[in-house]
Image: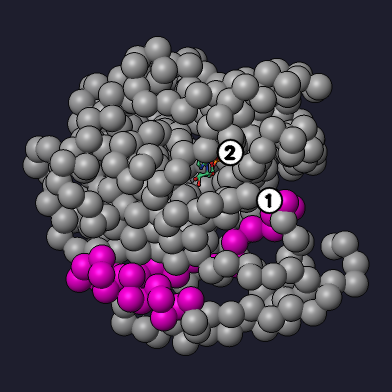
Amino acid sequence: MTTNNPTVVLVYQRTSLPWVFESAERAGIDLVLVPRPDEPVSGALPPAVVDVLPLDLDADRAGALETLRKHHGTNPFQGIVTLYDPAVPFVAEAAELLGLPGIGRDAALGAQDKRLMRERLSEAGLNVPRFVRLNGPGEWEAAKELTFPVVVKPATGFSSLGVTKAETPETLEAVVEEVRQICATKLGGVDGLVVEEYLDGPEFAVESLAHGGEVRILSIGYKGDPEGPHFEESVYRAPAALPEDVQEDIRREVAAAHRALGVTDGPTHTELRLRGGVTPYLLELGARIGGSGVSHYIASHVTGVDFAAQALRIAAGLAPESTGDGSPAPVGAAANYIVPCGGFGRITAIHGLDELRNDPRVDHVVQMLFPGDVVRPYPDFTGYPAFVLSRHTDIAEAEEFHRLLERSVRIDYAPATDAS
Ligand code: ADP
């Protein structure tokens, strides 16, 4: 099917999460979907998808770039994006190679590699916890000089995989070894680690849109106060109830981080902690829409701005539509409740989830795990059982709703008899 719409290649997007496809349709942008290797596309295509182009970024990166170049030669496209963090450098490289809009490979690497990110933020004078990079096996003693507790993490990890707190110098060696195991088994052999001081304070996520170096902060949301030792995601509620001066400090720090990392265009998802409850310290800035699109759901309901549509416009080389200046005043509240595994073994029942599908506050129940699936114990990570995405008049209502879900959604397990 050919239209006169601009075309954007969308890399490794989960088709079960509808938002970016719906936004593309609203924005009049056609998508060429590069399916995730674990999610081949069959049957009806998601909205706005006009073509499917399988690529294997991990097994054959050069071949994937070549396939894109050839496709661009016969069916030119105007942009390329991803919401999948590990693919951000590939997308930036492809855009650079094909002369398409993008942030460039160097900025993409800085936004993905936690060692580079920490160094670049620190050089720019931003708030950064003291940290040590561990380049090879056996190197962990240098990190004993940090103030404990510390957090050990893979340099290029994602989804909190392997991120682990070490309470004391005596436990550090074992924690480093555990994180290295996860790198080997779950992260395709990532070998660099970062050890950094634990930031004590509540966590927040910030959704922003950059264009031509101008950064517009759309929303700031509360992400709980996870204390470790492993950092499962739990809630996301926006707009966060924070004093205006703290919000202003967050906006300033986040905008400065974009400049420090050279992220001039496109959507970003920043996570930070308020050290001591007041001072923003960035955990990371992702050069993409967060949560495979959950960040779009949150930011667009909080602000009324179609976040993913603006992001796709920027990817296609178009200016974002004028939706006002500065940080938009909230028009509502939105939330994501991440159902905790709450145990491990073979799932026998999930209680309280189906009822939510008819709850007027709930827009989506995105279920990833089902009865029969096996949840392995931490530090192994099987995935999140489900997301419950909801809308509210204000954050207090969202909080109340989440308290209800804590009581009503529950998973039963039987011991798993095999390792599947
Ligand atoms: P990933 O990219 O794998 O998600 P992050 O660096 O964002 O890794 O860490 C995942 C989670 O671990 C964070 O959301 C936060 O809750 C926790 N975390 C990471 N680093 C620190 C730190 N220095 N202090 C406190 N918590 C941290």
Q: Nearer the viewer, residue 136 or 359?
A: 136
Magenta residues, start to end: 379-406
Q: Which residue is mark 2?
A: 149
Residue 415 horizontal side relative to residue 117, left or right: right
Residue at the farthest right position: 418
Query: In the picture shown, does residue 112 fall above or below 378?
Result: above
Name the kind of residue labelled 1 in the image: Asp
Residue 357 horizontal side relative to residue 219, left or right: right
Q: Is 306 contained in the magenta span?
A: no
Separation (CA) of disc 1 from disc 2: 37 Å
Q: Residue at x 25, y 48 (%)?
A: 219
Give the x, y percent position of residue 115.
55, 21
Residue 210 horizontal side relative to residue 295, left or right: left
Q: Which residue is mark 1?
A: 38
Give the x, y percent position of residue 282.
40, 34
Q: Is 399 contained in the magenta span?
A: yes
Name the kind of residue labelled 2 in the image: Pro
Q: Earlier in the sequence, mark 1 or mark 2?
A: 1
Residue at the farthest top position: 123
Quarter of the picture containing the C terminus is bottom right
| Foreground tag (1 vs 2) | 2
Query: In the picture shown, does residue 388 fall above or below 26?
Result: below
Q: Quadrant of residue 368?
A: bottom right
Q: Is mark 2 within 8 Å of ligand 1?
A: no
Q: Residue at x 63, y 67 (%)?
A: 341
